[in-house]
Amino acid sequence: MTTFKELGLSEGTLETLAAIGYEMPTPIQEQTIKLALAGHDVIGQAQTGTGKTAAFGLPTIEKIVPGAGLQALIIAPTRELAVQNQEELFKFGKDKKLKVRIVFGGSSIERQIRDLKSGAEIVVGTPGRMVDLIKRKALDLSKITTLILDEADEMLNMGFLDDIEFIIAKTPEERQTLLFSATMPDAIKKIGVKFMRDPQHIKVKTSQMTADQIEQFFIKTKDFEKFDILTRLLDVQKPELAIIFGRTKRRVDQLTRGLKIRGYRAEGIHGDLDQSKRLSVLKDFKANHLDILVATDVAARGLDISGVTHVYNYDITQDQESYVHRIGRTGRAGKSGVSITFVTYNEMGYLRAIENLTKREMIGMKPPTKEEAYASSLADAKNSVNRDLTDPEFAGKLAKFDKDVDALLGEFDARQIAALLLQGRVKDPDTQEKVDIPAEKPLPANGGDRFRSFGNNRGGGRGNGGSHNRGGNSRDRDRRDGGRNRDDRRGNDDRRGGYRGKNDRNKDQGYKVERKNDGKRNFSKKPNNKIKQPGGKGGFVMRERGND
């Protein structure tokens, strides 16, 4: 197997990699680093979790000249991914003492301008904020030698295509461009043709992305039953670290609140949280101060957290690629992981579409009963009591209660006292506080069948194919950078809405629409009090409304 040394990295970089625990390159790293060091443009198709940051970061840092100004720009779709990239690049460039700055919406632009003025060799950020900084003349890209687009397909889905093209136009033509994307829609290919020079294509197969170490299950259930089933699973499976995915920000807030009510150490992240709160939650989760992270797809995009043992898809994903990203949070570094997806009865088409993409069938799972959850919690309580009572240090701490214990034994039965002790440590489903998680708007019943038929088409198009709104207008960039609207749009976007053509707009404005047999339309400004009826070969006749 190829080593990092064989890829042509410098001794200083190799020492840095050894110090931070990098041993062997992943497939995407092995292929990308060689090509990037040789000066080629690269298009890499790989999911989050395959080691893309090191794949583009290491060769970029090798070429950076300290103190020579801004030389590399990395564009990412979300704050979280931008923060992760910055942290990794800072570690990789520590030997060179490189300045890696980060810019994104939802944070003070004035402070970011001050940071840029103080110097930077690498800038990482989200498209909207970069455009704003360029227009304010605070971000000068005239000396960029390396441009990196990370999660390019997600940026397109969030409506950033115009911003990306604006940014690229401000960089020198004689630059190296590295583009990474989980999927390769036509828009991504066009970027490669338009802005890259003879790019080399690298593809990590789906089987490598989904990891054989991940056991994938599904539970068929009704929406109102999900939360109780979830807490029973948590009690029975006892995950060390778990991520629960909800479709919308509202769902994340409700799940987080409900889990806290029932005594779990849980916090949520989504686009409406301010950056300091989000970073604080992620820091606590990585430090094992939390057991459960509840997140939307966008907020969790690009999270690199080791030790996640379980992923729970409280809401099934509306597109198959997001499922692969979700389960990729577990089963890392050769460790095993478990993924469990809750599916309502009308969502089975989505489940089958996901299986078609991953080439792996999910296993149906019977949810734990209340009795099984209680028995598991009781066993934990007994083990906890046993550990404490057999610990010499703990026994010494109990000595001061001897007189009080004698008094209690004289007044109450020892069995009652022991039962009271266990009651304080056992989660009893029969006495837990009721938590109401309102149902989300259901996904279109035919969605899974459509995805299965049309593959990776993520909306767009016209008519029955649907129209997927990929972002707000340019004035809303800061909000889009934070993932706002996008989180909820995943849950509320009915892709059957379709394209609204001229006919529909003219009817709203009071036009009468006539179609003659020659297929031409005539528009006249008259009250639209007629409706179309089939009539004649290839045409319509008009009838007065109300005559039916």
Image (cartoon, rainbow, N blue to C red):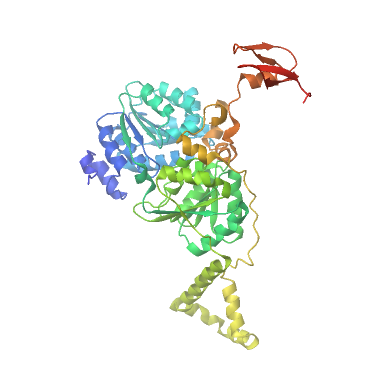
In this view, the residue farthest toward the front is 536
Front residue of 516/369: it is 516
Question: Hey, which quadrant is residue 189 in on the image?
Answer: top left
Residue located farthest toward the left when viewing the structure as drawn: 6
* Residue 492 place in picture, x, y as percent: 60, 39
The answer to whether residue 310 is above or below residue 81 is below
- Image location of residue 381, percent across then percent down: 52, 72
From the viewer's perspective, is residue 339 above or below residue 203? below
**Observer able to see residue 471:** no
Q: Which quadrant would the C terminus be assigned to in this image?
A: top right
Position of residue 146 relative to residue 362, above or below, is above
Residue at the bottom extreme of this rendering: 410
Let me know if residue 393 appears in the view. Answer: yes
Residue 496 x, y percent position in the rendering: 58, 33
- Classify residue 142 by image quadrant: top left
Q: Nearer the viewer, residue 314 or 122?
A: 314
Q: Nearer the viewer, residue 394 or 367?
A: 367
* Percent position of residue 334, x then y: 34, 53
Q: Say which residue appears at 51% left-offset and 55% top-offset.
A: 292
Q: Is residue 88 above or below residue 370?
A: above
